[in-house]
């Protein structure tokens, strides 16, 4: 079972995203190296559509969100985590 985290930005704080991004990216790289993060990225226009990340477990998604600089520094206005049971096809 995977878990998908959806982020929506706080429109009042989005202008700070480039300032916070280096800390967020370093944190993303930690999770990617550990193998618990499968993929991450923005949706369409990140200012209005937000972003999402796919984790290999709900625990990993919750741990990521708990310490993500984008969350801690107020860039994320709201977020949710949903369990996902995908069909995975070979490349």
Image (tube, rainbow, N blue to C red):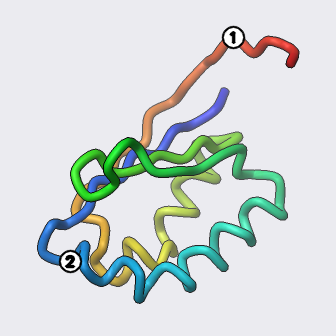
The foreground one among 70 and 18 is 18
| Outermost residue to the left | 12
Q: Residue at x 36, y 53 (%)?
A: 7
Q: Residue at x 74, y 71 (%)?
A: 30
Q: Quadrant of the N terminus?
A: top right
Sequence-wise first label, 2 or 1: 2
| Outermost residue to the bottom | 19
Residue bearing the label numbered 2: 13
Q: Quadrant of residue 8?
A: bottom left
Q: Is residue 19 left or right of residue 35?
A: left
Q: Residue at x 38, y 80 (%)?
A: 72
Q: Position of residue 2 (x, y in %)?
A: 64, 32
Residue bearing the label numbered 1: 87
The foreground one among 20 and 58 is 20
Q: Secondary structure at mark 1?
A: loop
Q: Residue at x 79, y 12 (%)?
A: 89
| Outermost residue to the front | 45
Inter-mark Cα distance, 2 to 1: 37 Å
Q: Quadrant of residue 63?
A: bottom right
Q: Is residue 77 left or right of residue 87?
A: left
For label 2, count other residues whose C-alpha is less than 10 Å away and answer few (under 14), some (14-19) or many (20+): some
């Amino acid at each position: 079972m995977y878990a998908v985290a959806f982020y929506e930005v706080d429109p009042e704080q989005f202008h700070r995203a480039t300032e916070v991004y280096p800390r967020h990216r370093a944190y993303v790289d930690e999770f990617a190296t550990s193998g618990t993060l499968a993929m991450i990225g923005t949706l369409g226009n990140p200012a209005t559509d937000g972003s999402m990340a796919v984790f290999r477990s709900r625990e990993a998604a919750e741990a990521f969100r708990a310490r993500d600089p984008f969350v801690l520094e107020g860039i994320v206005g709201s977020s949710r985590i949903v369990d996902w049971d995908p069909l995975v096809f070979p490349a």
